[in-house]
Each structure stands twice: as C-alpha cells, then as structure tokens.
Image (cartoon, helix red, strand yellow):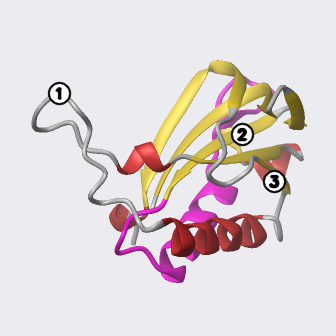
Amino acid sequence: MIALLQRVKRSSVTVNGREIAKIGKGINILLGVLKEDSEDDIHKLVDKIVNLRIFSDSEGKMNLSIRDVGGEALIISQFTLAGSVKKGRRPSFDKAMEPGRAKELYEKFCENIGEYIAVKQGVFGAMMEVEILNDGPVTFIIDSKELK
C-alpha cells in the first residue's frame, strides 16, 4: 500500500462539479492499493501516519503529529500510485489490486485512521478534482512494505 501524504492548509475534492468533502489544516492522503496488500498494511500505515511528526512546533521544527495539532485528513483513492513507467510510454497498472478488493481495503484504511483523527473521503473509482494547498511544501511517500 502506498500513501502520498501532503501537509495542507486546506484541501477539497469535487465530483461531477459538486464539492463533496473539504478539510482545513491537516493532511491530504492519496492512497494506492497494490495486489499483495492486506489489513496488515493498513495497520502499519495508520500507525505511521497518525504518529508522524510533520507539523511545526512553536520553534518551527517538525515535532508534532496530526493528532497533536488536531488536524484532519482527506483521503483519496489513487490507483495510479501502483503504476509503473519503467518500460514503454504508457504506464502499466499490473501491480494495482482489482477494484472490488481495493475498495474494501481503502474503506478499512479510512475507518481505521478515523479512530484517531477526523477523516473525510473522496469517492472510490470516481473521476475527481482534488484541490490541495500544500503547506511548506511538505510531501512524503510511504510504502507499507518498507515499514517494520
């Protein structure tokens, strides 16, 4: 499972011309689900994300977690994070999990992280417009397979 985190001042998602979710200070999470992912990957990512110290303290150092600052998360399904551009000119999505099971894991991820912080979601599988006002900019890519 791959999560692209962006610390944001605000973020929103629009589907079919209608804004369906927005957050203020927090993180925008683009989440890609890979074929070999399981609930264990969810637990690893959630633990890392909610405790990751990427917000500034009073001295301007990244020393606070999203929980510490009372931030929100906007979580968007992003199957293209499973894409490979190693060969040819068109991305390959062979590593992406099939949509039915990927949606289940996406929903479980949102539910699990929602036990720790306020969560808003995009619409799985929909064409979405995501607006992100990155704060910093601060951006991290976290692969659950690289976490212990």
Q: Which residue is mark 1?
A: 89
Q: Which mark is residue 27?
A: 2
Magenta stretch: residue 38 in it? yes
As drawn, 23 above or below 111: above
- At 14% from the left and 38% from the top, the residue drawn is 86
Q: Residues within 10 Å of mark 3 (few under 14, many from 20)?
A: some
Q: Residues within 10 Å of mark 1 (few under 14, many from 20)?
A: few
Q: Residues within 10 Å of mark 2 (few under 14, many from 20)?
A: many
Q: Which residue is mark 3?
A: 67
What SS does tag 2 mark?
A: strand
105 on left or right of 67 = left
The residue stretch that appears in magenta: 33-62
As drawn, 102 above or below 118: below
Q: Quadrant of the N terminus?
A: bottom left
Q: Nearer the viewer, residue 86 or 25?
A: 86
Magenta stretch: residue 110 in it? no
* Residue 88 position in % (x across, y down): 11, 32
Q: Between tags 3 and 2, which lies in front?
A: 2
Q: Earlier in the sequence, mark 3 or mark 2?
A: 2
* Residue 94 position in % (x across, y down): 26, 58
Label 3 to label 1, Cα distance in Å?
A: 41 Å
Q: Nearer the viewer, residue 130 or 126?
A: 126
